[in-house]
Image (spheres, rainbow, N blue to C red):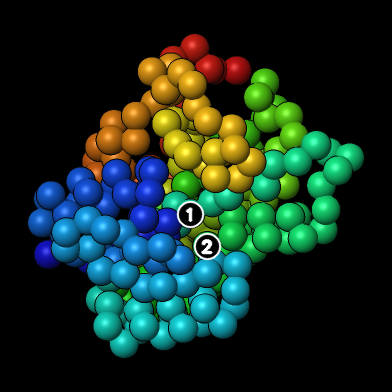
Amino acid sequence: MKTVIITGASDGLGKAVAKLLLDKGMRVVNISRSKCDLNGAENIACDLSNQEDLDRAVQTIKEKYSDFDVLINNAAIVGYAPINEIDYAKFEKTWKVNTIAPLYLISKLFDLIVENAADVINIGTTHSQHAHPGAENQLAYCASKYGLRGGSYNISMELKKTKARLVHVYMGGFQSKMHEKDYGNVMTDPENWMKPSDLADIILYIINLPKQIEISEITINRKGRRG
């Protein structure tokens, strides 16, 4: 039975992935402030912007889940603000959650990732490929996801000589409450956005690929959003 660790599996895409993996008989461990309420999910309470919480989460993984097969860095926040109004605290928290936390987790668990020949999946964004309409007022988010992209490149080079794999996913827009949680913008046209359950199918496919196959990067986008 595979053990999969997911950050931010209490809601949205992370929860959809967790549900599918649980349905497939895998062990799912969620790392977030809020519990994943799916039957069978195990939880590690953690504020991803807090180093002490991250260190405690790492220690729990080493003690209880050291044989994990997959680490999915999914959690993220928008950090929405007009470019001339964003404050230092919002910049800092966005970078801590979106960039530092996933890269720090990989760093602290690196030896186990190599030992387990584990897969690491970093959920990025198409906004870190090039500018898209709709990225306005998301300076902290776009910049922090560029940071995750750069970290993924570096870690991929470190893992090149091992059996472990890293996949960086450039994720396009999907049905989510990220914006609603951040600044109250409720999605009014969910039918025009990708479904988390469909994206979960793709993540499962990647996880189940034979070890001699590696998808280093993949872009998943809404129809018509190329370029």
Picture residue at 52% right of the left edge, 42% below the top? 178
Question: Which residue is under mark 1?
Answer: 75
Left or right, 21 with reference to 154: left
Quadrant of the image for the C terminus? Answer: top right
Q: Position of residue 70 (x, y in %)?
A: 31, 61
Residue 102 is labelled as 2
For residue 60, what is the image quadrant? bottom left
Image height of 207 relative to 142, above or below = below
Q: Position of residue 206 (x, y in %)?
A: 29, 44
Lower sequence index among marks 1 and 2: 1
Q: Position of residue 54 (x, y in %)?
A: 51, 76
At label 1, the amino acid type is: Ala
Picture residue at 47% right of the left edge, 47% below the top? 123
Q: Is residue 218 visible?
A: yes
Image height of 12 relative to 35, above or below = above
Closer to us: 153 or 135: 135
Mark-to-mark CA distance, 1 and 2: 8 Å
At label 2, the amino acid type is: Pro
Closer to us: 187 or 99: 187
Residue 19 is labelled as none
